[in-house]
Amino acid sequence: MTGSAHKKAVDSPADELPQTHTRPVEELDSVIIRFAGDSGDGVQLTGTQFSQVVAKAGHDFVTHPDYPSEIRAPAGTLFGVSGYQIQFSSRPVFTSGDAPDVLVAMNPAALKVNLPDLKHGGVVIANTDAFGEANLRKAGYAANPLEDGSLERYRLYPIDIGQLTASALKDSGLSRKDAGRSKNYCALGLMLNLYNRSIDDEIETIRRKFAKNPVLAEANVTALKAGYAYADATEMFDTTYQVRPMVDLKPGRYRSVTGSQATAFGFVAASELSGLPLFLGSYPITPASDILHELAALKHFNVTTFQAEDEIAGICSAIGAAYGGALGLTTTSGPGMALKTEAIGLAVMAELPLVVVDVQRGGPSTGLPTKIEQADLLQAVQGRNGECPVPVIAARSPADCFECAIEAVRIAVKYMTPVILLSDGGIANAAEPWRIPDVDRLPRLDVTYRTDPRGYQVYARNEHLARAWVRPGTPGLEHRIGGLEKDFLTGEVSGEPRNHEKMVEVRAAKVAGIAADVPPVQIEGDADAALLVVGWGSTYGAIAQARAAAQQHGRKVAHVHLRHLNPFPRGLADVLRRHARILVPEMNLGQLAQLLRARFLVDVIELHKVQGKPFKVSEIYEKLMELA
Amino acid sequence: MSATTTAGTLSKKDFESSQEVRWCPGCGDYAVIAQLQKLLPTLGIARENFVFISGIGCSSRFPYYMETYGMHGIHGRAPAIATGLKIARPELSVWVATGDGDALAIGGNHFIHALRRNIGLKILLFNNRIYGLTKGQASPTSEFGKKTKTTPLGSIDRPLNPVAVALAAGASFVARVVDVDQPMVGAVLRRAAAHNGTAVIEILQNCIIFNDGAFEHLADKKTRDDHRLVLAHGEPLVFGKNRDKGIRLNGLEPEAVALGQNGVTEADLPIHDERAGHGGLAYVLAQLDAPDFPVPLGVFRDVDAAAYEALNLRLRDEAQAAKGKGDLTKLLKSGETWIVADAPERLGGEMAGERLAVRSE
């Protein structure tokens, strides 16, 4: 339903293309390419570079890096295969696509792992250099699949990328081994030829990227040119393809952004918008570490990063900083989230603002560190001792992380509460084009520390039920807070039964009250449809695209994608009751479904996927066609 | 600011909170808090700039009784909370109140990492060698063989030595005092307060309910001088009621010797050097314990080292000097960007047969 459904061959105006081009150019709506190889083959870099090229050409795109948790798994093994998929299009795209049109396989293992996903009749570009006996054996091939006819339903392009690169670099002075490191650029050159892209921009980019190592830069440029020229000279591709730039992109300045970058930018923005210094206390964990890396490089802003001795110290240092008046932030993934549980409770009791980012990954325990899952929802909403309400929001895409970070801070400082922001490994590593917002138009976040000692009571509350934020160093307001239950007003330690009940209730009411302060439920698609799809987090793209496809086939589907998961936005109860059937696709065993049933007494139909991979559009589409 | 600063105008009473102190009558903690409340008004620091952070345990109730800012945290995590506060607010005087269970069992990791960073915290480690608040279980400093509720047949855990742990973690200020020795507690607290970086003070503290008399030999004025070695910078390692005993080093092996016997004189004893960059002697001293040796008290080590919070500020200054003060607009526009023109222009361009309506910036 996406892909190249609407192909039409057009003649290419000669002045637009290199002179050697006489082959037909086929125009496509969208293309899905997957680069795959050993985790040391540089496929992530190739993919990223390719995405930069298509970004600049004005396409919408979504990428999906998929890599093993081993840093350099043994070469040629199935478990060591790293992949990078990109879908780019002349129309809006929301996912990296289901079945690739093109697979670039740098070795037999990469072919074996990825071939099942390839579209029937799709293009396989195979690096024959790596299809030696040893690699074939490691991948479990009895015979060479490039020669035994088993790939006959695909368009196979066997190319000795290794040899091609080596020949191009024979005068570079580099050893064969070092020259081999440039073969990903050779592959990139082939792909740019296949998609009729100029390599001039890419050459500039390489020179900029490797400015510190000119020898390597020139080697990569040479390899890139070699790949491009080879495809041209040999007329390797009988047809090349062109995807038109997207016409309905909102005007403005764009960049490509990953979820981790957008998250980091969002918190820096929140710091600027609130005037609060940002303090990140964090401990390295996949796939959340990139946020720490991004912010660690931004010390020239009002940003402090602290690499703590463990997850608990990460959050506790952020709580200490928040007590000191900073914007406290901690970032982690599932296992680290589990370790932070007790400290989140402390922040709830102390009523200090704090943001906890959980970039979810496959669980439980160490689980699938580099794979995608959204199974920490119940942990975020409920996973603490005692009655311990915490607002929870979730980002739906890489760019959405920017707004979600600001929203998390807004809630935290306005309501004096920890807030959990859920993202996942797919969002964190994936990239999409992002229209850069105008900083002057971002909403200011008003924060005032109390300085007036007259009539001060530690737990006196404002109309939002938030207590005052008082920084140490303020004369006359010396006070103590902590994890022991406190008196409703004075904040002195209190074990009084009624007081405790009152405090439990007021903490719950404070968080519940946030529902009145977030945008009401938004319905996408057909509001009057019998079928409503309710999703959250990174499933947005697959759901939206599946819905659009179902609508094209005459079905009516309503779609609500929840950013606020605790509390739910106003009006959700009414929306749920308006539809005869409710489908909840989740990358878990039905956690949002459970919350919806419990909260609204409505039944929902669950659609699960827990394979460490995102939903395919087709998986949701089929369910929609069945239910709509 | 609506109230004026209180620096230099207050007395001990002003540091006593309105909370009723709930330690057991006779608890060693009373003596220590009294010394601290006496000390703080004399330091020239405004009351509002003191913060006490604690974990969980009897001694961790400390912040509630101090009329300063304070946070009663969660078990073992006080150094981590205090670290975040000190980094965010280096100008504050941040103190940590913790116990042997809090700092050395559940919070051991935070304790050693605070010390290796040399962050400007003053850590009061109340060591009563027992879990008091949970009613009498063995702690990480309980003696080998000690019988408690959890070790009815005697503990088979070997105890940690807080001073040795602190030295091994690279602490720049390490001291040990006995709770009831008011003059020494006061003097050492004052030195800790003035120290740049982390200062850790092990306070041998009597738990009158679950481990009464654990430090009696060091507390009783009549006998203590024969059981303790009071460390003094630049002085030989002499001890004893009549100052007639000493600690001599035989290679790296310490030995207790009687002065005036077998020709041993003070000149044979090592001189205590708390400022030695090499902490070898301090570590040897930390190993001394009853019954074979006197227990060293006072300052083991006090060396200059850059404090973490100061280094952190320097990093920021250097980053700002190198890159200029952060500009959000510039940051968002960093890297590869491109402009998408208005739709009419693009559509027009397309009709005119132009290939790209998008230009790279």
Image: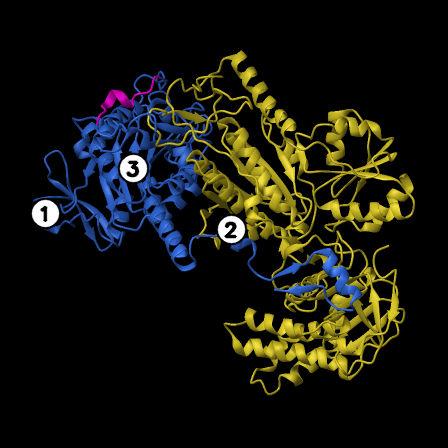
Q: Mark 1 = which residue?
A: B266
Q: Mark 2 = which residue?
A: B328
Which chain shows up in yellow?
Answer: A
Foreground disc of the pair 3, 1: 3
Gap between marks 2 and 3 measured at Cα: 44 Å
> Residue at 51% across / 41% down in the picture?
A273
Foreground disc of the pair 2, 3: 2
Gap between marks 3 and 1 measured at Cα: 28 Å
Give the magenta-colored segment's residue range.
Answer: B9-18
Q: Mark 3 = which residue?
A: B201
Q: Earlier in the sequence, mark 2 or mark 1?
A: 1
Disc 2 vs disc 3: Cβ atoms closer than 8 Å?
no
Q: Amino acid at mark 1?
A: Glu
Q: Dot 1 surroundings within 10 Å: few (below 14), some, or many (20 or more)?
A: some
Question: In what element is the residue under mark 3?
Answer: strand
Image position, residue B16 (x, y; %): 30, 21
Foreground disc of the pair 2, 1: 2
| Horizontal relation, residue A164 to residue B79: left or right | right
Question: Marks 3 and 1: same chain?
Answer: yes
Q: Dot 3 surroundings within 10 Å: few (below 14), some, or many (20 or more)?
A: many
Q: Amino acid at mark 2?
A: Leu
Disc 2 vs disc 1: Cβ atoms closer than 8 Å?
no
Which chain shows up in blue?
Answer: B
Question: In what element is the residue under mark 2?
Answer: helix
Question: In what element is the residue under mark 1?
Answer: helix
* Observer able to see residue A355: yes
